[in-house]
Amino acid sequence: MINNSHNENIMHNITIIFSMHLEIGKCNSNELFSIIENENPEIIFEEFDIDRINDEYYKNGHYKYQNGSTVETFAVMNYLERNKVIYVPVDTYDISYFPTEMYRKISNANEKYDELFKQNILLSSEQGFPYLNSIECCDLLENMHFIELDVISKSNDKKLIEDYKAWQLITENRDNEMLKNIYNYSINHNFNNAIFIIGAEHRKSILDKINEYNSKEKIKISWRSWRIA
């Protein structure tokens, strides 16, 4: 229910669950479903393109069976079928492509990058969500980011440099867009317990931006990172 006269006594608590879109090993929709079930949220915010909720397959619950459906799609839609909970997709930024070729060039330029990529996949498969929500995962992804910057700084490939800058801008804009949508929703709605499911690669940027948003927005949100109970 929308409440334009916001009640200051209501605490907006949001738990961030970092995920990987690829279903592999212990990083699977059943594990994520169990996490959501344990959190028992009133609201589910998700890194999901808001435009896709108009898709007929989405409306009739079959979207989760489409090619390219993610761990999050399966888990969330299964949860929504069994529970009365408000679902709010917050990724409204227009993305027309994923820079597969850009990442291939970076991987070819530095063997360590490919090793870290494979290690991240392996640990995600072996340990699942406890790993994806760990400092270890954050540090590994940050090391990959440092390699990206190093490769770009030494590259003479103008297209690679331009593609990388463009993708970084898209990522930055998406993170801002998602948080803006969450804060806008929270200003107009009272809730106590929500979750926000987003890819682990967004972790550092999102956590940094949360500090900025909480200092400038009209509403203060109490954020926590998911941990095993």
Image (cartoon, rainbow, N blue to C red):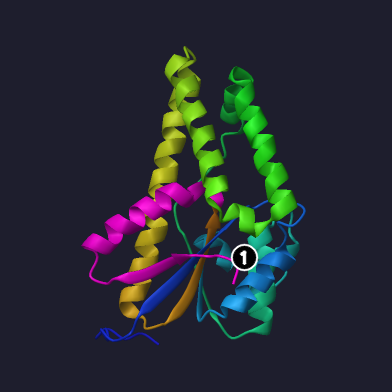
Task: Tell me if residue 152 can be seen.
Answer: yes
The correct choice, above or below, for 158 with respect to 13 in the image is above
Q: Position of residue 128 (x, y in %)?
A: 69, 56
Which quadrant, please, contains the N terminus?
Answer: bottom left
Q: Which quarter of the figure has residue 187?
A: bottom left
Q: Is residue 169 magenta?
A: no
The correct choice, above or below, for 168 with respect to 76 in the image is above
Q: Secondary structure at mark 1?
A: loop
Residue at point 73%, 59% (across, down): 66
Q: Which residues are magenta?
A: 200-229
Pointer 1 residue: 55
Q: Is residue 105 left or right of residue 123?
A: left
Q: Position of residue 158 (x, y in %)?
A: 45, 17
Q: Which quarter of the figure has residue 17?
A: bottom right
Residue at point 57%, 80% (across, down): 40
Q: Is residue 90 left or right of residue 35?
A: left
Residue at point 44%, 44% (across, down): 171
Dot 1: few (<14), some (14–19), or many (≥20) neighbours within 10 Å?
few
Task: Tell me the amino acid under the disc marked 1.
Answer: Asp
